Amino acid sequence: MKPYGELTKDEARVELSAAREAFDALKAKQLKLNMARGKPGKAQLDLVSDILTVLTTPEQCVSDGIDARNYGELSGLPAAKKLFAEILGVKPEQCFIGGAASLTLMYDTIAKAYTHGLLHSPRPWCKEETVKWLCPSPGYDRHFKITESFGFELVTIAMTPEGPDMDAVEEAIRDPAVKGMWNVPKYSNPDGIVYSEAVIDRIAKMKPAAPDFLLMWDNAYCIHEFEGDYVPFPDILSLCAKYGNADMVFEYASTSKVTFPGAGISVMATSEANLAYMEKLMGIQMISYDKVNQLRHVLYLKDKANTLALMKKHAAVLGPKFRMVLDTLDREIAPRGIATWQRPTGGYFVSVNTEPGLAKRTLALCKEAGVTMTGAGATYPYGVDPNDSNIRIAPSLPPVEELRAAMEVFCLALRIAALEKRA
Amino acid sequence: MKPYGELTKDEARVELSAAREAFDALKAKQLKLNMARGKPGKAQLDLVSDILTVLTTPEQCVSDGIDARNYGELSGLPAAKKLFAEILGVKPEQCFIGGAASLTLMYDTIAKAYTHGLLHSPRPWCKEETVKWLCPSPGYDRHFKITESFGFELVTIAMTPEGPDMDAVEEAIRDPAVKGMWNVPKYSNPDGIVYSEAVIDRIAKMKPAAPDFLLMWDNAYCIHEFEGDYVPFPDILSLCAKYGNADMVFEYASTSKVTFPGAGISVMATSEANLAYMEKLMGIQMISYDKVNQLRHVLYLKDKANTLALMKKHAAVLGPKFRMVLDTLDREIAPRGIATWQRPTGGYFVSVNTEPGLAKRTLALCKEAGVTMTGAGATYPYGVDPNDSNIRIAPSLPPVEELRAAMEVFCLALRIAALEKRA
């Protein structure tokens, strides 16, 4: 099998014709497969459905003397704070417990900055001429959409295998209009990169010109290893505090991929000063998030050790799916030299970087053959990938056998896109 | 028993001294009673705790082909929309299902108006010089706080026994800076007033100068009769539509006082055009609210008839508490002629209007004797009651016997406050 770079034009034509024939045969199967989002599959949902029956009596609803059924406790149940604090390595009093999506807590933090300002803001961000925002890319499309929605100017920062390009970050934050930065520090979405300790240290000690710089630390995959054991990770809150940046960072996590994506709980962790400030604003917006569901999670997950044991069961479902993706790429794409990828051991994605100019065409072909993927460009600010190269594969939803078919389609599509440029 | 208006100064002194003696005896009991918020009592929570066990198996989690456990369905489960639509008399496709508090949906609607603008806004409200907001008063303190928090100028509108003073409203909305109005149309908070059909009709056909006027219709007590049968109520959405104002109104309701205050579901109902616009913005903020809890509510409440039957059980707990409050006021205060009140048959409050200048003093005395009430002034914009007269009594939390003691304290406190001005 020759790398495509070494094919003559004639060889490319022959190869293209063979690939198209194989592709047409797959198209004829009228597949309907989805690798678009990091959505857990049914086996994972069934795995955790005992959570439906952990809390059944009125007596169980009382936690630390608080009746979870009634109004009150804006920042959540102490027991839920304790659970997340142990998982993240922060203090319970740094935690605010949210509802089914940490995305909402993130949105609301930025919305509050926009409407009211943060603790150290000279004014609400809606009164600023320009707000700029750092987006390590490829990154998470939903993050980028939030900051785009508020009219911020998105600044692309390159991702390296160690995390964001910190030289570029340190240069950018000298501009006081740069107000914040997105991060998925462990098993980044989509590359699956784990920020190195050196990068994390440089982030924690940044001295941005903006006094209200907002370091968004979305620790979405904090315990989401699908290969090997749990990998300990630094506590960004105490690290920032060590460098005099205690109020710079807000960390987020959730049980969306631990229990039910559609009925989980989430956490926002930040300095006690930030929390006191935010709670004054949030107390106007809500009474509290669902406390009975918080308690259900406390009773079901118990503590970090028990939660990590549960994550091993998720890994047993997810591992074979990721291995299928990587094995197929290794077999079908690697020898042809038309794309590269990381080999993540946690998170929910495999991120493929094709030769420039192939992503859109590849995904259009996938669509033709009934395979839905995250849209090309989605992993870049404004949905525009300057190289038209990054493709995010989300293998969690389909069963392994469907995934095999979907990856077969994907690899053929990518090969055809690469060959069309050569033939 | 003489009305206090007819007491001589000497008679007032004698009466005051007797009242103080009785009050000191109560103070000595070191009571700790709370009539501050419309918080259901334990008996009501126990009444509905079967909701904890209606949904126990993975199979039950599938509703209309949707697995409630997984991501998706931004606007909520169809079955939950159907339930609220029947209760409110709106269409399911006009419903967006929220989490534990309709307050959050209300806040978010106004926040979106502020950050992005509503469907017919010329610009986001944060770009307006001034935003004014109509507040029928006495009204709900948490409503007023939301609009105050965004820096709107709050305009007090008098409440009549029929609803807001519509002459004043119609005059006020000629100002294009007036962007909206709060309403609790059925069993208003705190007076318990039900808007008359004539008032509702005038509201629905308003022609505000602002093209993006936001009629906030908080139907918090839509099925919350504690005396007598369910009282049907007009559907504000179709009424507004009839007058060409389909996009003017957002209606809200929740199960906070139907099932668990701390773990309920809520609804925002508005025109399909408004919903389509809002969902574009909300899709950036969230994936969906907790769908498993939506399904739990669907299975538990079933339909309107079954929900109304449940509300009768709540009424059986609440009725005696409200009767205790009204009977005590009738006996202790009415003959003395120092305050007036409505006689609500639904909702969560009794609102007492004292002679001018007595509210703060009365509540300070209550506090001395260990009885916590909603702060004086809370029912007016900026927390300032121009007459220092309105006091909101929330009798739902304490058991009847505690309530008896609390009302004894309250009536003595009010009498002392009235006598101090005369003696």
Image (cartoon, coloured by chain):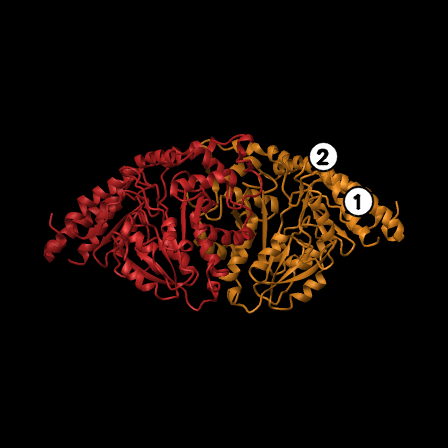
Chain colours: A orange, B red
* Residue bearing mark 1: A20
Residue A358 visible, this orientation: yes
Q: Which chain carries label 2?
A: A
The image quarter in which residue A401 lies: top right
Q: Do discs 1 and 2 share a chain?
A: yes
List x then y, in percent, for residue B205. Answer: 34, 56
Tell me if mark 1 has few (under 14), some (14-19) or many (20+) residues whose alpha carbon lies within 10 angstroms of its own.
some
The amino acid type of the residue labelled 1 equals Arg
**Marks 1 and 2, how far apart at CA:** 22 Å
Q: Which chain carries label 1?
A: A
Of A217 and B57, which appears nearest the observer? B57
- Per the rendering, the mark at residue A401 is 2
Q: Residue at x 57, y 50 (%)?
A: A103
The amino acid type of the residue labelled 2 equals Glu
Relative to A12, A257 lies left or right = left
List x then y, in percent, for residue A298. Answer: 54, 38
Q: Which residue is drawn at 68% across and 66% down?
A: A171
The image quarter in which residue A40 lies: top right
What secondary structure is found at the residue carrying circle 1? helix
Which quarter of the image is occupied by the C terminus of chain B? Answer: bottom left
The image quarter in which residue B171 lies: bottom left
Q: Residue at x 33, y 34 (%)?
A: B313
